[in-house]
Image (cartoon, grey):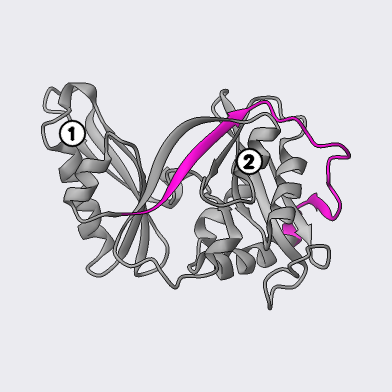
Amino acid sequence: MLLAASEVFGVDAPDGRGLAGSVTLTRWGADYAAVGMMLVAARYERRGVGRALMEHSLRAAGEGATVTLFATDMGRPLYEKLGFTVVRRNVSFVGRFRAPSGHGGRGIRAATEADLPAILDLDRAAFGADRGHILARLAAFADRIAVADAGVAPGQGIAGIAGIAGYAAAWRNAPASTVIGPLVAPDGETARRLVTALAAGAPTPVRLDLDPDRPELPGWAHAHGLEPAGRTVVMAHGEVTGRGRQGHLYTPISVALA
């Protein structure tokens, strides 16, 4: 999906063995982008390949553009040197999901092709930028997409979006886990019902990438079988405040698409 929808930059390995490194740049309009999949071959670590790839990505994003990414402890020092600052924490919760009694599926149904315009509108209002070129590929990429019908969410959804109050997708991360993302909902109750609908009966361990400082999902996810399995931080180069309704964003599409 990233190869089809994003820009991918690479550095040829001097020894002729493939790439020394690569990175993806996904644009969310003219002034907003995400960097992901920043990979450097082990034999070329600490030779400036990562820095060259990041500097190229920032130039490609354009002067004045905000660029975001998920950073590991290994990558964070480089990103800080390039001017990135921490926006929030992220914890990956992974495990066999134990569905709550009754499954809490009221008002949740499988998405149809007819829901796509409403999903795109809902996502744009929450995210604050157009992710349509990625979301339009979800039907082919994801195993399942679920929507919460408008009128059943206590928070009444997002003003101006008819038909649905929230949505979420579940996709397979190789054979290892089922990732639930993106997850957009007006409140924690709706978010939990969407997760339950997608995670119950999943054939692999479920993964949720969550802000541990928010109350709605981390404790609930842990109580239903998901354990903290990895920690990163979301970082930004540029201004991120004032975009969309960040409280309605619960999980990213993936950690390659901050």
Q: Nearer the viewer, residue 187 or 139?
A: 187
Task: Compare marks 2 and 1 and give the one earlier in the sequence.
Answer: 1
* Relative to 240, residue 75 above or below: above
- In the image, residue 251 lies at what x, y percent? 56, 49
Residue drawn at the location 56% of the way across and 34% of the way down: 93
- In the image, residue 151 lies at what x, y percent? 83, 68
**Left or right: 34, with 99 as reference point:** left
Give the residue type at disc 1.
Asp
Q: CA distance from mark 2 to mark 1?
A: 44 Å
CA neighbours of label 2 inside 10 A, class few (<14), some (14 to 19), many (20+): few
SS state under label 1:
strand
Residue 142 in view, yes or no: no
- In the image, residue 203 lies at what x, y percent? 70, 25
Residue drawn at the location 27% of the way across and 42% of the way down: 76
Residue 196, picture quadrant: top right
CA neighbours of label 1 inside 10 A, class few (<14), some (14 to 19), many (20+): few
Residue tagged 1: 12
**Left or right: 96, with 250 as reference point:** right
Residue 124 covered by magenta stretch: no
Span highlighted in magenta in the image: 86-114
Give the residue type at disc 2.
Gly
Residue drawn at the location 41% of the way across and 69% of the way down: 241
* Relative to 2, residue 200 above or below: above
Q: Which mark is residue 219?
A: 2
